[in-house]
Image (tube, grey):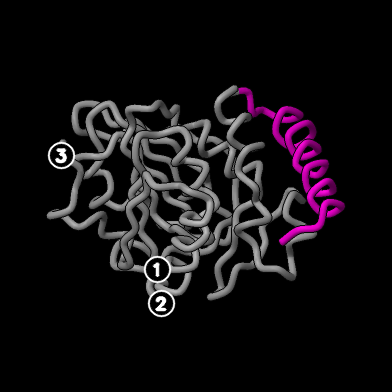
Amino acid sequence: MYSAEEKDRLARARQHMLRLNLKGRDITDPGVLKVMTEVRREEFVPEAYQSQAYADGPLPIGMGQTISQPYIVALMTQELRLNRYCEVLEIGTGSGYQTAVLSKLAKKVYTMERFGQLSESAQAVLGRLGIGNVEFYIGDGSCGWPEHQLPPSGYFDRIMITAAVPKMPEPLTEQLADGGLIVGPTGLSGVQELVVGEKKGGKIIERLICDVRFVKLLGKHGFEE
């Protein structure tokens, strides 16, 4: 539980984040800006780091993983151009913060996480916050969502990869609907390129957004352990 003083401090920090780190840069989508003020990032970070919840940088969440900086969460979300009809696949549940942001803009989120401990923690937080339009799966996200549990259409309208991959994994692009969008960091070095791909006629047309730095996605179509 937070004291009234702490709640007030966090609320001010959230508004500071909105004004300087989101609106002050290139986040212009009204829906994304609204959700970024609604989802309380402090709920998703370890207690030791809650005072830094709205600093514009990543924070450790255990298992060698991080929660992305607010600006990158907003940027990747904005690039997906979500609407209430979208069914979204998220690769890398992590803390569940990005999951929560997506859930408030899409019809449903399907989220995969390699580490069971992180998935279970994220499920607990989202459950406590009353977010119910999310389906969780523990497994190798680079291989895509299990075929027998795909949405009724058999495809996802949007896909977000929240860890670095050498290139867009083929199992994921195969599960993307034609006309759909996929966003994620790609590259073999410590610094990757954030790429948005649009599927047209079965092919992915990529567009570079900016340089980023993410932890690696381990898996069959990601990086080796």
Q: What residue would you read off at disc 2?
A: 225
Which numbered disc, 1 or 3, marks the residue that appears first in the sequence?
3
Mark 2–mark 1 CB contact (< 8 Å): yes
Mark 2–mark 3 CB contact (< 8 Å): no
**Is residue 176 within the magenta segment?**
no
Q: What residue would you read off at disc 1?
A: 218
Residue under the image location 47 percent in, 53 percent down:
162
Q: What residue would you read off at disc 3?
A: 152
Looking at the picture, tell me which residue is in the foreground, 150 or 211. 150
- Highlighted range, magenta: 1-28
- Give the class, few, some or many, for how many residues have Cα within 10 Å of label 1's Cα (few <14, many ≥20): some
Q: Seen in the image, is 24 located left or right of residue 42? A: right
Q: Quadrant of residue 1?
A: bottom right
Q: Seen in the image, is 17 located left or right of residue 128? A: right
Q: Seen in the image, is 129 located left or right of residue 176? A: right
**Is residue 19 within the magenta segment?**
yes
